[in-house]
Amino acid sequence: MPKGCYVFLVEDEVMIRMMVADMLQELGYRVAGEAGRIEEALELVKRTEFDIAIVDVNLHGELVFPVAEAIKARNRPFIFATGYSPSALPAEFSDRPALQKPFQIEMLGKLIEVALKSHRSAQGLAI
């Protein structure tokens, strides 16, 4: 998918969310929406158009898996961002890429491209 696609960003730490939003813009992506709480994220998943999401695993002590399920139900790719080991993710999300915090802009860009390409390939769409 070309640069310029829309990214939905779910992160509870405001400074980290701002930093990731800046990274996304530098990489040529647009932020479609931002959420810092599970309820807010669930609502935005329903009414926001986005191509991919970046989802922090832990939002204020709550695990983000209901949001991941909602994104999956909309058939959108997503990447987990986590300070935990990616092996700590539930089995149903083991196929999803995970960014280990802290991460660099290059890794963010690479994982977005891989996730978008993989999703398009799985959908039988031209890459």
Image (cartoon, rainbow, N blue to C red):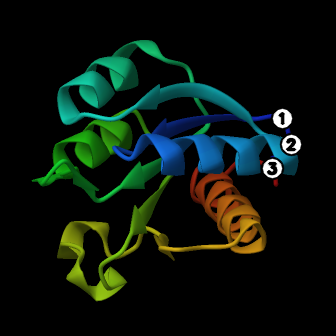
Decide: is 114 above or below 8.
Answer: below
In this view of the protein, can residue 3 be seen by the observer?
Answer: yes
Q: Answer yes or no: do the residues labelled 3 and 2 have beta carbons within 8 Å?
A: no
> Where residue 119 sits: x, y (%)?
59, 55
Q: What is the x, y in percent for residue 19?
A: 63, 49
Which residue corresponds to mark 2? 28
Q: Amino acid at mark 3?
A: Ala
Give the amino acid type for the residue marked by disc 2 in the picture. Gly
Closer mark to the observer between disc 1 and disc 3: 1
Q: Earlier in the sequence, mark 1 or mark 2?
A: 1
**Residue 37 percent coordinates (x, y):** 25, 34
* Mark in the foreground, 3 or 2: 2
Is disc 2 surrounded by few (<14), some (14 to 19) or many (20+) residues within 10 Å?
Answer: some
Which amino acid type corresponds to the residue marked 1 in the rendered image? Answer: Gly
Q: Which residue is pictured at 30% across the width and 79% down the height?
A: 84
The number of numbered discs placed on residues in the rendered structure image is 3
Answer with left or right where residue 40 lies relative to residue 35: left
Which secondary structure, mark 1?
loop
Residue, disc 3: 126
Q: Are marks 1 and 3 in contact (CB under 8 Å)?
A: no
Whether residue 10 sits left or right of residue 110 in the image: it is left
Q: Is residue 76 visible?
A: no
Alpha carbon distance from label 1 to label 3: 17 Å
Please say if the residues under marks 1 and 2 sit with CB atoms less than 8 Å apart. yes
- The residue wearing badge 1 is 4
How far is the residue under mark 1 from the one under mark 2?
A: 5 Å
Dot 2 falls on a residue whose secondary structure is loop
Residue lying at the far left of the rendered structure: 62
Residue 71: image quadrant is: top left
Return the x and y of residue 59 as percentages of the image width and height: 23, 48
How far apart are labels 3 and 2 at the CA level?
A: 21 Å
